[in-house]
Image: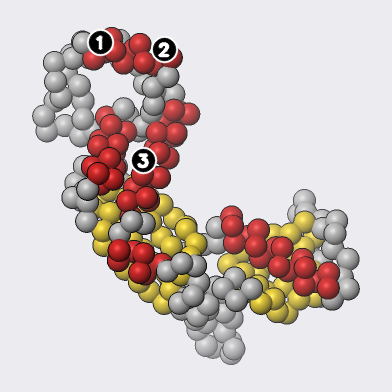
């Protein structure tokens, strides 16, 4: 209950500040001055607007961003304490998209996870009332775009495998992205996603130069396949 109230009150504060923010030094002084210069909150207005505000100053973009990230982190923490979410994501999962609502009604935030043990995408939506709705879909139906941790892991695994096969790639830059199945026949429609989490890794000089080596990495099993020079 405490974490739920913290998330909801933080969201209200973030929106009231015009997208988020925090207090430091001169900001705290301005806050104290403004606090004594308002008579309440305007009813029926969203975002919440103080009445009779004097010397109003918008928080800097940096502070708004930091405050917004704090609210997202608080909402994520609340979601990951939910038993249904914990059961769905398991102990071996990755975190992906996080969306914070800008409306006072409906949902507060939504988060996307991927369970590597079950090969399932999990979406958890935190409502304004604190309830969490969980939707689980197989990897073949929907997968999120790769995240930074997956890219690093895939590149390292591919680099180790290619080096073990005798390829010299020490000076080459590695990149990785989620890959998709190809149609086996020209007239056939390709499946939207694989039924597991596979990233396509390439190594090259960078700066727009075509890559020299590639490999496919199964993030869940850490198996590298089809590694070698690009032709």
Pointer 1 or 3: first along the chain? 1
Question: 192 or 98, which is in the foreground?
Answer: 98
Q: CA distance from mark 2 to mark 3?
A: 23 Å
Disc 2 is placed on an element classified as: helix
Q: Is residue 85 above or below residue 108?
A: below
Q: What residue is shown at x 77% (from left), y 56% (from top)?
A: 173
Question: 223 or 216, which is in the foreground?
Answer: 223
Question: 206 or 108, which is in the foreground?
Answer: 108
- In the picture, the disc for residue 209 is none
Q: CA distance from mark 1 to mark 2?
A: 16 Å
- In the picture, the disc for residue 71 is 3
Q: Which residue is identified by label 2?
A: 26
Q: What residue is shown at x 43% (from left), y 73% (from top)?
A: 120
Specify whether 74 is left or right of 218: left
Specify whether 126 is left or right of 180: left
Colouring rule applied to residues: secondary structure
- The location of residue 193, given as percent across then percent down, is 50, 76
Q: Residues within 10 Å of mark 3 (few under 14, many from 20)?
A: many
Specify whether 210 is left or right of 120: right
Q: Which residue is identified by label 1?
A: 54
Location of residue 56 (image quadrant): top left
Q: Quadrant of the C terminus?
A: bottom right
- The location of residue 28, given as percent across then percent down, is 36, 15
- The location of residue 164, given as percent across then percent down, is 83, 73
Q: CA distance from mark 1 to mark 3?
A: 27 Å
Q: What residue is shown at x 29% (from left), y 13% (from top)?
A: 32
- The location of residue 37, given as percent across then percent down, is 21, 10
Q: Are marks 1 and 3 in contact (CB under 8 Å)?
A: no
Q: Residues within 10 Å of mark 1 (few under 14, many from 20)?
A: few
């Amino acid at each position: 209950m405490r974490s739920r109230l913290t998330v909801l009150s933080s969201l209200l504060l973030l929106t009231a500040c015009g997208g988020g923010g925090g207090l430091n030094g001169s900001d705290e002084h301005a806050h104290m001055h403004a606090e004594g210069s308002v008579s309440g909150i305007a009813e029926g207005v969203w975002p919440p607007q103080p009445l009779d505000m004097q010397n109003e100053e918008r928080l800097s973009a940096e502070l708004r961003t930091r405050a917004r990230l704090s609210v997202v982190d608080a909402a994520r923490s609340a979601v990951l304490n939910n038993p249904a979410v914990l059961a769905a994501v398991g102990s071996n999962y990755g975190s992906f998209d996080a969306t914070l609502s800008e409306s006072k009604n409906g949902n507060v935030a939504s988060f996307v996870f991927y369970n590597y043990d079950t090969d399932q995408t999990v979406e958890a939506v935190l409502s304004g009332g604190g309830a969490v709705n969980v939707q689980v879909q197989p990897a073949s139906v929907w997968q999120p775009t790769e995240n930074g941790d997956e890219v690093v892991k895939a590149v390292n695994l591919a680099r180790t495998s290619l080096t073990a096969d005798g390829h010299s790639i020490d000076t080459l830059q590695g990149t990785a992205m989620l890959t998709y199945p190809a149609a086996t026949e020209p007239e056939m429609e390709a499946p939207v996603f694989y039924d597991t989490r596979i990233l396509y890794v390439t190594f090259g000089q960078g700066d727009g130069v075509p890559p020299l080596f590639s490999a496919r990495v199964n993030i869940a099993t850490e198996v590298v396949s089809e590694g070698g020079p690009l032709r």
